[in-house]
Image: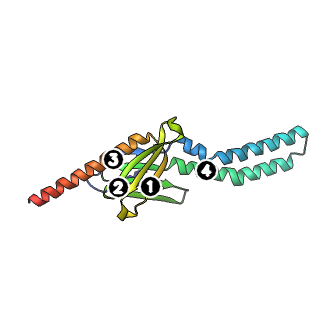
């Protein structure tokens, strides 16, 4: 993450204001299927033991399924959760999406391109996470960038909005100073 900060925080006055990862429930939601498969393989072995079946086949099947389906998928989900970040700087928002050991997507969004920021609660607001939606201006694709399971989504969206406002004021003040010269 430090390399990403060095690479994308290049301005001499640009500094990091906020950095956040995603809530752990996003990881749990991603591995529900794998947990069900793991549970069914454990049940298969228990049933085989209960009926006194030879353990060679149930253990082989369970081991194969766990090694081929469960572990790689859980590892991918863990990497995707653990190394995804939102970094808010004084000049831009940087969205980091690490999908595997070898693949990531880093999306810097300049504040000039931000049309608005909003939040939405998830799971009836029972937990301290939500959805952050960054609306891009129409000339920049006009689509919304949505990140779910963001801890304290209201605070993150508020900080992004604050930085956009400060950035715009700074640009207006620079324009006024240039016109006065």
Mark 4 lies on residue: 75
Residue 180 spot, x, y in % from top left: 9, 58
User: Which residue is nearer to you in this view: 100 or 127?
Assistant: 127
Q: Is residue 19 left or right of residue 24?
A: left
x%, y% of residue 166?
26, 48
The residue carrying mark 3 is 161
Residue drawn where x is 54% and y is 56% of the image: 99
N-terminal-most mark, 1 or 2: 2
Residue ID at (90%, 40%): 51
Is 163 on the left or on the right of 176, as rendered?
Answer: right
Structural crowding at the residue carrying mark 4, measured as other residues with C-alpha within 10 Å and reported as few (<14), some (14–19) or many (≥20): some
Marked residue nearer the N-terminal end (3 or 1): 1
Q: Distance between the residues labelled 2 and 4?
A: 34 Å
Q: Residue at x 50, y 58 (%)?
A: 104
Please give the label number shown on residue 114.
2
Picture quarter with the C terminus:
bottom left
Determine the secondary structure under disc 1.
strand
Q: Which residue is drawn at 14% across and 56% down?
A: 176
Element at badge 3? helix
């Amino acid at each position: 993450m430090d390399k990403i900060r060095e690479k994308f925080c290049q301005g001499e006055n640009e500094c990091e204001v906020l950095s956040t990862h995603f809530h752990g429930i996003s990881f749990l939601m991603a591995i529900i299927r794998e947990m069900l498969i793991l549970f069914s393989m454990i049940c298969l072995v228990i049933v085989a033991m209960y009926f006194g079946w030879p353990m060679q086949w149930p253990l082989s099947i369970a081991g194969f399924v766990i090694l081929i389906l469960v572990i790689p998928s859980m590892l991918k989900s863990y990497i995707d959760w653990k190394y995804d970040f939102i970094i808010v700087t004084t000049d831009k928002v940087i969205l980091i999406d690490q999908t595997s050991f070898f693949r990531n997507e880093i999306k810097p969004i300049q504040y000039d391109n931000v049309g608005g920021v909003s939040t939405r609660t998830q799971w009836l607001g029972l937990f301290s996470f939500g959805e952050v939606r960054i609306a891009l201006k129409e000339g920049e694709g006009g689509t919304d960038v949505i990140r779910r399971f963001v801890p304290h989504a209201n605070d993150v969206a508020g900080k992004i909005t604050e930085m956009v406002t400060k950035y715009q004021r700074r640009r207006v003040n620079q324009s006024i100073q240039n016109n006065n010269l």
